[in-house]
Image: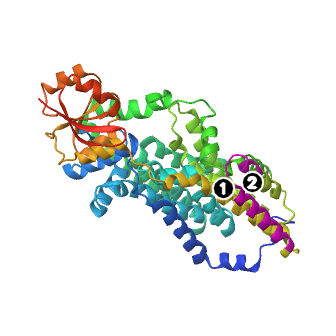
Amino acid sequence: MLTIEQSPGIRDHSPAVASAFFRKEKWSVGVLLALATAQLLWKLGQNSLANWDESEYAQIAREMLLSGDFLTPNWGFKPKFHQPPLYVWFTVGFFKLVGINEFGARLASALSGIVLTLVTYFTGKLVFDKKIAFVGCLILLTSFGFVDNARFGTTDTMLALFIYLALYTFLLINKKGAWLWLISCLFMALAVMTKSAGGLLAPMIIFSLLLLEGRLPGFLLTKQFWLGILLFLAIILPWPIYMIRTHGQAFINDFFFYHILNRSANALEGNKGDNFFYIYQLGHRFYPWLYTVPFALAFFIKELLHRRTQALPLFVTAVLVFTLFTLVKTKLYWYVVPLYPALSLLVAAVLTEAIRTVDSVNFGTLTAMVLLAFLDVKLKAVGVVCFSVFIITIYVWQKRKPMYYISVALFLFSILMAQYKLKQLFSPDIDEVSVLASRHAGPQTEKAKTLLLYKGIDWPAALFYSNQNIKQVETPQQVKSYLTESRGRVMILAKKDAGHLASYFAIHTISSTNQYLLIEIKK
């Protein structure tokens, strides 16, 4: 089997220092680990939790920790039949370790991203070589979509981690032995326990590979296959069986029919888009690397037609993830997080060839990517001047190998542009409603007082930060009706609405931010 590095007629022009770096694998792995840790953990807890998904998972973990019920997820003291509890279990553990805060709420996702970076490296090394694997991880760690979601406290990065662990251990079977099928099935099961139907991507990818390689019929007859399937079922079945026995039809309707079948067949909660939705998203979230994806796919289709199939696992993964989520009617940009590692390695294979070979047509791909990306980003003029001077200097200094160093410079410039786009993730983003809700926080029990939110203020983050029940009210009449039945007299409202409400009630301002007030309604 030919790899890109072994293809005839290609000469590697990498200098000795680069070759020495990749020969000592602990150096490259150490660098990637340091970069991933810095990119995904730095300032992880500085911003408020986002409304809905992120604050929802954090609140479910908090209620699970306080109640001691680790099987039934609860949100706002009511059962929440959304996803299996594996991700929440990790978050509960981190809450115990670092406290119930933003950092703890996001730590399971961020650590999954760090480990996924290393799994991407070893998968790239197995499929291609160390250099491509290293470049692929650099691309992954500068992809806005990957970094953003890894720093976001939801299930998708952990799902991607288990999918790629399942794929990597499956690919190792030929080298290490059939017993790895059991490990692969373990990771497939953990993917399902992370995100239910989304976790089925892992077995779909692996069974597609077995089918395309003509190995499926024989594999079905082996003892190891059925042992792995039994292990898979033994892990994924106990929780839904328990939930059905405990909650009956309510769980079946919500978990299976609403969150799996209905979400696939219909655009729920306004999350809709056309068949080009994820292409548009990748234009922003896989910048600037998306510009090389068509070239990479064309290159690997040509390789497959010539029966050079080393990239088939990554190609199948990318195509399946993109196609399946395009067909699903409910569309959210984080659904395709499992796409980023495969795309990063496929793009890296093309760009690495452009860097290390002077006669490669892929140099044109690299140049085109930089030019297209440059048109789509605002960089200071001084940066452009410095880059131009750098290119000229390299050309004059390294007359024997100018194209190699120019290729490296173009790639590093692409990294710079990608990192420039990432800077917004490290800027402060404090939600004023969350700040006021935290100022009124109290011990959370089902008998806790109620915090009122006036006129359309989103409530999931307020629920997490206040430790209180939440009630949304839209009019003064609703406020009056609610006050006759409840002990809750504290409210968050926009400053622009305070004057109108004051004409109905006597109010006392407890605290304020630029746009919102925390008030108490007097009797």
Residue pictured at 16% horizontal, 38% vertical:
449
Drawn side of residue 2 relative to residue 211, left or right? right
Query: For the residue carrying disc 2, how many other residues have a C-alpha within 10 Å: few (<14), some (14-19), or many (20+)?
Result: many
Residue 28 spot, x, y in % from top left:
60, 73
Coloring basis for residues = rainbow
Instruction: Tell me whether circle 1 and circle 2 mark residues in contact (CB < 8 Å).
Output: yes
379 within the magenta span = yes
Drawn side of residue 21 relative to residue 227, left or right? right
Query: For the residue carrying disc 1, how many other residues have a C-alpha within 10 Å: few (<14), some (14-19), or many (20+)?
Result: many
Image quarter of the C terminus: top left
164 within the magenta span = no
Residue pictured at 49% horizontal, 65% vertical:
37
Compare residues 223 and 505 and report the one nearer the observer. 505
CA gap between label 1 and label 2 equals: 9 Å
Is most of the magenta stretch helix, strand or loop?
Answer: helix
Compare residues 242 and 476 and report the one nearer the observer. 476
Residue 509 spot, x, y in % from top left:
22, 38
Residue type marked 1: Met
Magenta stretch bounds: 370-396
If you read the primary sequence from the N terminus, does the residue marked by circle 1 or circle 2 appear first?
A: 2
Residue type marked 2: Val
Residue identifier under label 1? 417
Image quarter of the N terminus: bottom right
Residue identifier under label 2? 370
SS for dot 1: helix
Residue 238 spot, x, y in % from top left:
31, 47
Q: Specify the farthest residue to the top.
A: 477
Drawn side of residue 375 relative to residue 170, left or right? right
457 versus 138 height, above or below = above
Residue pictured at 38% horizontal, 41% vertical:
51
SS for dot 2: helix
Can residue 269 be seen here? yes
